[in-house]
Amino acid sequence: MARAMYFESNRSSRDGMIAIGSIVMNRVRSDDFPNTGRAVVRQKNQFAPGVMSRSLDGQGQALAKVSALAVLAGE
């Protein structure tokens, strides 16, 4: 999920990352999507190209990880 948050939000802001994380979690809870965050993020054409293969770098990486933990904690 942190990878999707990082690439989809263009490493912009915590709020942007939380929004992407919320989308992932809403899909996990839906019967129309896979039931894990990883499977949701890996779905073809759902998130930024290369989301699972490109490298994360810089301060955006740390922010994405912290933001993902916040979403998983219910924020």
Image (cartoon, rainbow, N blue to C red):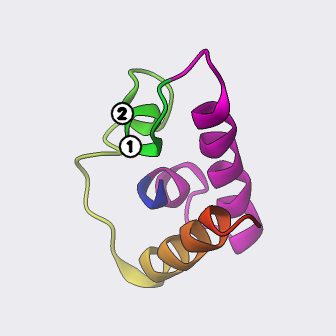
Instruction: Give residue 27's position: percent from left, percent from top.
Output: 63, 32
Residue located beneath label 2 in the image: 42
**The residue stretch that appears in magenta:** 4-33
Query: Which residue occupies 61% across, 56% down?
Result: 9
- Per the image, label 1 sits on a secondary structure element best described as helix
Q: The residue under label 1 is which amino acid type?
A: Arg
Label 1 Cα neighbours within 10 Å, binned few <14 / some 14-19 / many ≥20: some
Instruction: Give residue 42's position: percent from left, percent from top.
Output: 36, 33
- Seen from the viewer's position, the closer of residues 38 and 16 is 38
- Seen from the viewer's position, the closer of residues 32 and 56 is 32
Q: Give the prevailing secondary structure in the magenta stretch.
A: helix
Q: CA distance from mark 1 to mark 2?
A: 6 Å
Label 2 Cα neighbours within 10 Å, binned few <14 / some 14-19 / many ≥20: some
The quadrant of the picture occupied by the C terminus is bottom right
Check the image and report above or below for 7 versus 64. Answer: above
- Seen from the viewer's position, the closer of residues 40 and 44 is 40
Instruction: Give residue 29's position: percent from left, percent from top.
Output: 65, 34
Which tag is nearer the camera, tag 1 or tag 2?
A: 1
Whether residue 10 sits left or right of residue 29 in the image: it is left
Query: Which residue occupies 70% across, 73% down?
Result: 14
Residue that extends furthest to the top in the rendered view of this protein: 32
- Seen from the viewer's position, the closer of residues 15 and 12 is 15
The image quarter containing residue 70 is bottom right
Q: Residue 38: which numbered mark, if any? A: 1
The image quarter containing residue 56 is bottom left
Check the image and report above or below for 21 versus 57. Answer: above
Asked whether disc 1 touches disc 2, contact meaning CB atoms under 8 Å apart, the reply is yes
